[in-house]
Image: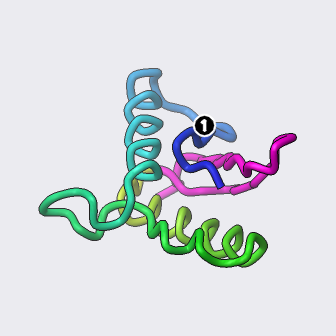
Amino acid sequence: MDLSNIEISFAYGEGDNATRREILRNVRTLLATPLGACPLYRDFGIDTAILDNPTPVAENLMAVEIMDAVERWEPRVRVTDVTFQADQHGKLHTKVVIAWTTS
């Protein structure tokens, strides 16, 4: 599973381009950071130990991990979809779709 090049996109929404770029940058940084790697914020990031599970289990656990992390660290958006797609070499690529929260 490739977490270094996660595709993140807005499903729909409002907001100016600067805010959208900031949110995309924040979510991209969050999802590319292994849990425990950020000094003073050891609970920031994604638990990469999930990837040691069989692929179907890892996909489900990673989807939940991504949703929980985005909900906690970037409350302006919510995850609406997480998909995984294998390339011709069997490497899984992750796509995360986010939308503005309504609160």
**x 72%, y 76%: residue:** 54
Say if 50 sits above or below 95 in the image: below
Q: Nearer the viewer, residue 39 or 99?
A: 39
Does dot 1 land on a helix, a strand or a loop? loop
Say if 62 sits above or below 1 in the image: below
The amino acid type of the residue labelled 1 equals Gly
Residue at the far left in the pictured view: 40
Residue 87 within the magenta-colored segment of the rendering: yes
Residue 94 within the magenta-colored segment of the rendering: yes
**x 28%, y 66%: residue:** 36
Q: Quadrant of residue 5?
A: top right
Residue 86 is left or right of residue 7, and the answer is right
Q: Principal SS element in the magenta part?
A: strand
Q: Residues within 10 Å of mark 1 (few under 14, many from 20)?
A: few
Q: Nearer the viewer, residue 60 or 3?
A: 3
Q: Quadrant of residue 43?
A: bottom left
**x 68%, y 46%: residue:** 95
Residue 7 is left or right of residue 24, and the answer is right
Residue at the far right in the pictured view: 88
Which image quarter is the N terminus in?
bottom right
Residue 23 image offset from top left, x and y in percent: 42, 39
The residue indicated by pointer 1 is 13
Residue 81 image offset from top left, x and y in percent: 71, 56
Residue 9 image offset from top left, x and y in percent: 62, 37
**x 55%, y 65%: residue:** 67
Residue 35 image offset from top left, x and y in percent: 35, 65
Q: Which residues are magenta?
A: 77-103
